[in-house]
Amino acid sequence: MREAKKIMLHPPRSVRVLGFFFAVIISFSPIDGQRAAAVNPAPGPWAEAIAAFEQFTAEAMRLDGTTGLSIAFMKDDFVWAKGFGYADLENIVPAKPESSYRLASITKTITAFAVLQLAEAGKIDLDAEVQAYVPYFPKKKWPVTVRQLLGHLGGISHYRNDVVEGHIKDPKKTKQAIAIFQDFDLVAEPGTRYSYSTYGFNLLGAVVEGASGESYGDVIRKRVFEPLGMADSKMDNPRNLIPNRVRGYQLVNGVLKNSEYVDVSSRFAGGGTRSTVLDLIKFAQGVIAEKLVKAETQKAMFTSMAQRDGRVTGYGMGWMVDPWKGHFQVGHSGSQPETQTFLVIFPAERFAVAATSNFEGCRPVLYVRRLIELVLDEDLESAAYARSREGRLMSNACDGTFSTGLSQYIRDGKELAQDDKDLESAFAYFKANVNARALQKNFAAIKKNITAGFHLGAGQALTKVGSHMAALLKEAFGADALFGYSKSGPVAFFNDYIRATKKRAGWKKAFSFDKDFVTLLAAWEKDWQRTYPDAVRRLAITPASDFEAIARSLKTTFSGASFYRDFSEDFAASAQYFLDRKDPERAVHILDLSRDLYPNSPAPYASLASVYAWMGKFEESRKLYEKAFFLDNTSEALGVDRFLIAIGRFRRAAKIPEGLAFALLALDFYPKDARLHLETGNFYVAAGERDKAAASYRKALELDPGLDAARINLEKFK
């Protein structure tokens, strides 16, 4: 089943929202600009932002084929909500703010509150084994605690076999839902590996029932929905009459169809609720006002957990907690038959956005991101391009230091470092690694150190540096200025800190930056101020854009600069849109424009290589990948996950010979990746080459004995 899975990027940067989100083929667009319903007018300072968002949404829904969308935001005491498209296409029922959607994995946030409320009441010990509350759940090789389940650290499997688990039609009671996975082996020793699991949250639902003596549905109704006035939130039950229930839609071979019916009581506490965007805003208001649990409990919920090796996961207790361009934000996404959902809350700014769609191919985060950008007048994905790979990595390190440090300080109201000695050590770590000379000597090793600098294993050194900078900047310029850095960005954050420390008598040199770094930051600031005017900051690139005109304008703006805004992911997303619409020549042209703008970046080369592979031009594809690896073989654009995403497209398009050839090409670069061997085996099966498929599955299991999909596929041959 397609529940949302967490993807972590470190140094932390929010998911590149436009990347890959237009990759949908649809033969007709159901969107009618007249079919929209709203609550609240568009007054005050947000009228222009709302109008721009409505225009963006109409165009984006036409492009990505979204059938229906409801979206809402709150800012301070103001709430706006609107429906776009249709809740029911067959009966021409418009989507409304009151439309009722499956919440999917947003349910996990509700479950987490129920668990922690019971913990506050003394009915649940978070560090107790789950069998204390669910005695019928079998003991495993290692103990599994409630706290570990809340952070996806319990080792409980996610869905294993979609043929069986992805198409459940019959309603399940709690014990029946637990029975689906109770005999699965743990995927890892609890505490050692973040592994997203809806089943783990089902187990938490059983914990809630065992500790309270009530049904899970009754507990969340009494403890979450009713206290917050969420009258339209409830367990999803297909037999009950639910006002404003939407119908779900999916694409099958490029043709719009009704969603397959799946009874979601089988994942009741991990994705079994239904609600409206208006109720989700009430939920956000309750979270911001700390109405559901004590302040210290909520702070623990919103603090990232960590693996035993010290790696921060970006997931707290039931909530994703990655910073977003310096904002302290919490949220969750959801993906399920009939629905796609997204909720994000910025507690310190008293700001939240909720989006729900009845189209399985929709990516609501696309709309959420754009609405946030327009309301806050920010560019949430302002990645920077530098001509050298050392410069790009240093920029990324500064971005992560800024984002994690500012977010942590906003959340806690105090610095992360314990004392001056701790802070001195953190600055020493920063200066030793965010260092051009060190990178030129040993790029790969220093990059690992930079990545580690955001995790507990290295004492979160880079986050401590950013947190201290935020504290000083607040002291120097005030709280309002501090919040403004999410708009002005990391370069301004660093340079303002450098200027502020120069004016302070007796400032410790240990808390300053090296001369070479200060000189580099000054040059970056000069380039950025010239190349990042409002027109560039507010630029939103979609497949409907005039790419030639944009490229000409950007090239003129960027001329003579060595540090400027990187739109390569946006170009790649639009290229993918045209590729999916069987226009590879247009995709190639867009990526050539991107290559011209960012000649030393591996990302445009990797995207173009993927397109040539799709076209069956594997020699050209290989040459482009080799060029990309030459530019930076550690780039995220060349990671295994990017190859796996591309392989998934080949599979969904039933391009078997091309997909097999591409999988084999990927193995040339990553011969020891078990997932690539698994996908190669799948293509061999589709090509009728069973012996080669079996060999691929065996190799996958040799590399990763815990790769269940390879084992299941191999057993089918028997």
Image (tube, grey):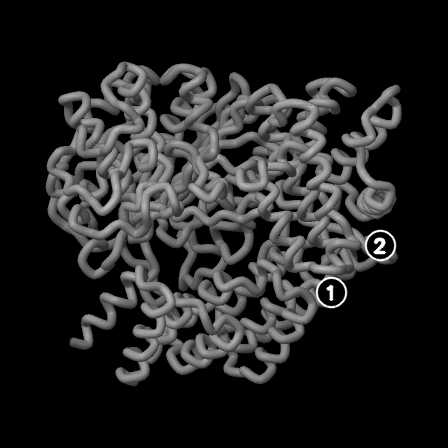
Determine whether the residue tagged by mark 1 lies in a helix, strand or loop.
loop
Query: Cα distance, mark 2 to mark 1?
Result: 13 Å
The residue to which callout 1 is attached is 600
Residue 93 visible here: no
Residue 701 vs 328, above or below: the answer is below
Residue at position x 41%, y 60% in the image: 28
Quadrant for residue 630, please give it. bottom right
Numbered circle sitting on residue 561: 2
The amino acid sitting under disc 1 is: Asn
Give how far across and how far down residue 27 sits, in percent: 40, 64
The amino acid sitting under disc 2 is: Ala
- Front residue of 633/241: it is 633
* Quadrant, the C terminus: bottom left
Residue at position x 42%, y 39% in the image: 342
Around disc 2, counting alpha carbons within 10 Å, would you say few (fewer than 14), some (14 to 19), or many (20 or more)? some
- Front residue of 345/196: it is 196
Give how far across and how far down residue 333 sits, in percent: 41, 41
Residue 539 vs 591, above or below: the answer is above
Is 636 displayed left or right of 269 in the figure? right
